[in-house]
Image: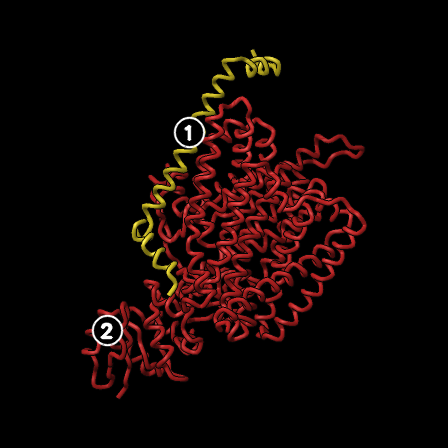
Chain colours: A red, B yellow
Amino acid sequence: MIALQTVEVLAAVCMSILYALAVAGYGWLGLRLMVNPSDRVVIHSRVGRLGLLWLSFVFGQGILGSLWLGVAGAALLMPSVVFGVCAVGWLLFACQIVTISQELFRGSAPSPSILSILFHCGSWYSWIAVCITAVTLLWGFIVLLPPDNYDAAVWYLTSAKLIAVTHKIELQPFIMPHAALYPLQVETHWAALFTITTETAVTVWDYLCAFSFLSGIGFLAWSLTDSRRVALLAITMMFTSSGFYNLAGAGKTDIAAAQYGIAAFLWLTIRPVLGRAATVHAGLCAGWAMAARYTNFILLPALFVPIIVAAYRSLSVPTTRPPKPATRFVLSESLVLGFAASVVLMPMLLKNWLLVGSPLAPLLGDTQAFWFYSEDRQNITPLDLAFYPFVWTFKYLDDSFGNISPLFLGCLPLFLLYRADRLPRLTSLAAVGGVVSLLSWLAIKPLILYTRWLLIPLGLLTIPLSAGLVAADSDRSGSRGSRLLIRSSVAIACLFLLFESRAALYGARYLLSLDTRDAKYASVRGSGYDVIAWLNANVGAGERVVLSNWRAYRYLLNPDILLNSESSQELQWLSDNAERLSRPEQWRYYAQQSFSYMIVSREEGRFLPSLATPELGIRLVYAGTNDSVLKLEPK
Amino acid sequence: MPQTGADLKHRTDSPAWSRQRRLWLALSTLWLQVIVVLFVIVGIARLRTPPSGWFRKLLALLSIN
């Protein structure tokens, strides 16, 4: 007899994979409509069949994300609608498979694939490929675990789950800062998945997006250098970054958002052979990247690099027609790129305008509004800035969820030493793009260093650094000792990654129903699970709980509790009167608004009941590890 | 006098250049190794439970109950 938990997890995994196929189906349709067959052959020759599939997958995510936004905006995100849209996607994917099979049957030249990138690199590289494949599989087990990333469980997943429960996008006043006002390009997919299946499907989907991000880096590296070794080491470099693997399948939007950035850059690298269609696609991908995370605007300066290079190259190519002036070319391409980006970014801004009247809320807009959010997130000092690469590699950074791989810093001298060699020279576009993107961030927020916000420049920088590593490894004039040091360094980094994947054991135990979801959350410090479990069990239908700024895993609360908590009007009133209200007056206000429960810290829970007034009784009803629940009893 | 391509090729083919390049390569690879090993040491030191405790935990975990 198979346990129910095992069945649920397996069903969610299947659903997530099926969803990915539907997404690829829509992407394929999009590519078919926007790129003519001869251009598809060009893309095929540059990135192979799987590369084309990857571009379809990313493009499909963009299309469906925008579609879900519209559907949820119209309060129609129902299971029937999601299944209907997915069914069409499956049909489209089936058509794609038939077309590809026909191409194979016609005997078109077989193209290299990601598998060949991984396993045909020569003996040492094959071992690295085996290790990366093993780690990828191990992470496949880790993502089966219930999500316990703090940000995910407090904001991102809560927001997506509530969109699914209510079938629509609302302001969601019960999440602070107000996640619904952030760009939701990634969360809309999660909401669609929550509508038809369980949370495991969401984490597995996020894992598939992380895998897709790595694949994108591999395809970009391969497209630039034609070297499978560079592609493999670029993937390894990104995978060994804790800032990447800590977020793979964790329920945070950053990696899924970064896929679009890599795809935008890949489109522009094939622009010289594809023409303006590539610029349009790059613009759409850049728009989706920003519609998933505003911080991805740092991609835009990087995208000018291939455009400027293309402009100057076109001048040097002899043609019968007089060449276009470079500035005119750059300007026209930028306009096309900008227009395409704004077309897909606009719905996200429109959503905010409809919700609160400010397109860039909660970061810009009415500073007196309760939803306005401003927080100084500085996490490094000016001295840290002087040692930026070292700090990024070694220092524990608050709220960053991880560092970068030591291979970035370690390979820098090798890249500089071999910069004039063939492989590193071929990657100069990615190198300059990555540096420009990083410098854009440094110019704006130099003292904020979150690895997850810089995944696009990091992805670009893996390519030149890997090229330097491969060039050094292939240098026959170097000593055997040097080669041994290079290979052992990469091997150590891979082994450490393998060690960091040890939680796969817990994932396997969860899949086998040996561990339960409750036990998992009960063991997470700071999740507030004891109080959440009490509230879920004891708060009756229609009873209201003051959640205020309680930073627990709200995702685990019953949706009814969240939906019945403070309304926008109540939060605005409290925000407007915060300075003149004493705490007993605040409690009186809550009681007047029919709130029954209030969550306070454990210490406050001990003495606050003694402050009860003749009109308002306050009773401690539950004392948890960190927080307590008080019952408000108006007399 | 500006260097020509031939001058540069002659310089890069010379034994002195080759020695210098080998030295830089050795130093760069040593740097790579030091950074990676340091990273692993820092990573292990940051573990919430010390390796001995973790090892004990692993053993307990494997004896599935």
Count residues near mark 1 (Cα–Cα under 10 Å), then give few for <14, some for 14-19, many for 20+: some
- Image quadrant of residue A317? top right
The reply to whether label 1 and label 2 mark residues of one chain is: no
Is label 1 in a helix, a strand or a loop? helix
Query: What amino acid is at disc 2?
Result: Gly
Give coordinates of residue A216: x percent, y percent: 59, 48
Query: What amino acid is at disc 1?
Result: Leu
Is A380 on the left-hand or right-hand side of A620?
A: right
Distance from the alpha carbon under mark 1 to that under mark 2: 58 Å
Disc sitting over residue A605 in the figure:
2
For this orientation, the residue located farthest to the bottom is A635
Relative height, residue A170 to residue A392 (above, below): below
Quarter placement of the C terminus of chain A:
bottom left
Is A615 on the left-hand or right-hand side of A332?
A: left
Give coordinates of residue A230: x percent, y percent: 57, 38
Is label 2 in a helix, a strand or a loop? helix
Q: Chain of mark 1?
A: B
Give coordinates of residue A250: x percent, y percent: 46, 58
Q: Chain of mark 2?
A: A
Q: Which residue is mark 1?
A: B30
Q: Nearer the viewer, mark 1 or mark 2?
A: 1
